[in-house]
Amino acid sequence: MSDKAILEINGEKHELPLVKGTENELAIDIKSLRSSTGGVITIDPGYKNTGSCESAITFLNGEKGILRYRGYSIEELAEKADFLEVAYLLIFGELPTEQQLDKFHSDIKSHALVDEDVKKILDAFPKAAHPMGVLSSLTSALTAFNPSSVDVSSEEDMYNAIVRILGKFPVLVAWTMRKKQGLPLEYGDDSLGYVENVLKMMFKNPNNPYVQNPILVDALNKLLILHADHEQNCSTSTVRITGSSHAGLFVSLSAGISALWGPLHGGANQAVLEMLEAIKADGGDTKKYMAKAKDKEDPFRLMGFGHRVYKNFDPRARIIKKAADEVLGDLGIDDPVLDIAKGLEKEALEDQYFVDRKLYPNVDFYSGIIYRAMGIPVEMFTVMFALGRLPGWIAQWREMRMKKEPIGRPRQLYVGETYRPFKPLSKR
Ligand code: CMC
């Protein structure tokens, strides 16, 4: 097989090298395109065909429904691993030894306190504020309290910034929820595992000691692992491109949180539950909503369905659907919304519109049902996604900085007015 692609522009041939990934995926390297063609660029709105980087973190094959972190399958990690182990794996490339994991966790715990003044910023938000907006602002504000996290010229500086945010972020997550609920702001408990600590900080009632429920710990551990990375999606690309200007880690993450918030991305988990509730309130007529989703005049989309990359099945959705059944069963909850979700899925999988467009349930379709069963308010669902995605964003940001990638700066094809002389106000 040739290792070059030939591009012909106006009768002139240009050779472009082909590069191959470790899973035999092919890419045309267009780094020299502009210089060799005298300024020709490629155009690809939504970057559907554009690789923005070479990455060794996550492998995703949308046709075959494969997702692997650093070579390990998502199915195995969700079943056997702990979230913090997965975080270490994503960020540093290998599963940690017991000693490495202990050190990692203890470094995270030693940086888990958040400056008390951050509470004043939180206090200034109205209670009605969406927790994603609050989280994005507080994450950005952390930079002011930890200025040393910005200049990461050594690996040690980078490590310190990473353990700081892994320690402080769950505190912010818990605080955004507690503020909304009018509860006192809790700090963590160093005797607990990372996931147990998150649950305690979120749910501890001021009047009672918090008792861990292993079903909730397992469910959250699994959900966080399933969300931990997904290669160059919208929020991750945002983190990488923000960080490529050498803005600090925390503000890069804050930008990623904002990108995740949108309903076409992480915000879909909230939108799914709201949609299922609306269908239930409307008498549970799934056929009516299927018809709306297919009607091109109707802006309604079946939230939690479809994916830019998965054109077979989202492997995370399969695991989450099974977990939803188990968690609700274990907790003794009978949620009619789960039945509506299953009914919609069944209809969509048999419907020509969805079959033709290869639209399957994605990670967000069933996750909200589990979050709700855990007692997490709907507006917090995307925040939980952010908590899971944190190690992936960090890993991608670290990879980008370690590889000394150039600042992200796409080109454009200008289609506006050509030159025209300025018209004074009196003549317009
Ligand atoms: N309901 C109805 N029609 C849909 C849907 C849907 N959920 N998703 C895609 N389509 C149709 C779309 O109208 C288009 O039809 P046509 O070819 O006739 O114009 C076709 O399928 C292709 O859709 P697209 O919008 O060009 O595909 P995309 O790759 O740009 O968008 C997506 C992917 C995830 C944004 C989209 O499927 C969607 O909006 N889904 C609902 C929101 C959602 O669940 N998002 C979570 C994504 S997974 C987690 C994450 O990324 O955070």
Image (spheres, rainbow, N blue to C red):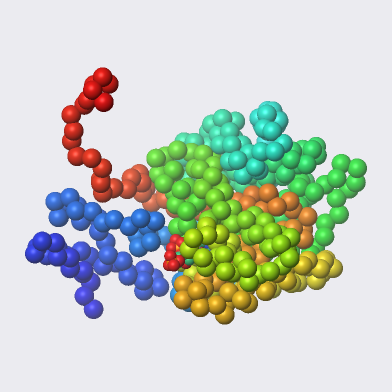
Is 359 rendered above or below residue 175? below
Q: Is residue 105 visible to us here? A: no
The quarter in which the N terminus is drawn is bottom left
Left or right: 152 as drawn, with respect to 334: left
Is 195 rendered above or below residue 331? above
Q: Residue furthest right?
A: 207
Left or right: 384 as drawn, with respect to 157: right
Q: Foreground: 51 or 132?
A: 132
Left or right: 104 as drawn, with respect to 423: right
At 17% from the left and 65% from the top, the residue drawn is 7
Q: Residue furthest top?
A: 426
Q: Residue furthest left?
A: 11
Is 295 rendered above or below residue 46? below
Could you tell me residue 143's position as x and y percent?
55, 34
The quarter in which the C terminus is drawn is top left
Q: Is residue 423 visible to us here? A: yes
At 26% from the left and 61% from the top, the residue drawn is 29
Number of labels in the image equals 0
Could you tell me residue 274's position as x and y percent?
67, 56
Left or right: 310 as drawn, with respect to 213: left
Quarter of the image holding residue 366? Answer: bottom right
At 63% from the left and 68% from the top, the residue drawn is 288
Could you tell me residue 148's position as x and y percent?
53, 33
Is 387 rendered above or below residue 141? below
At 68% from the left and 29% from the top, the residue drawn is 124
Could you tell me residue 84's position as x and y percent?
64, 57
Q: Foreground: 293 or 232?
A: 293
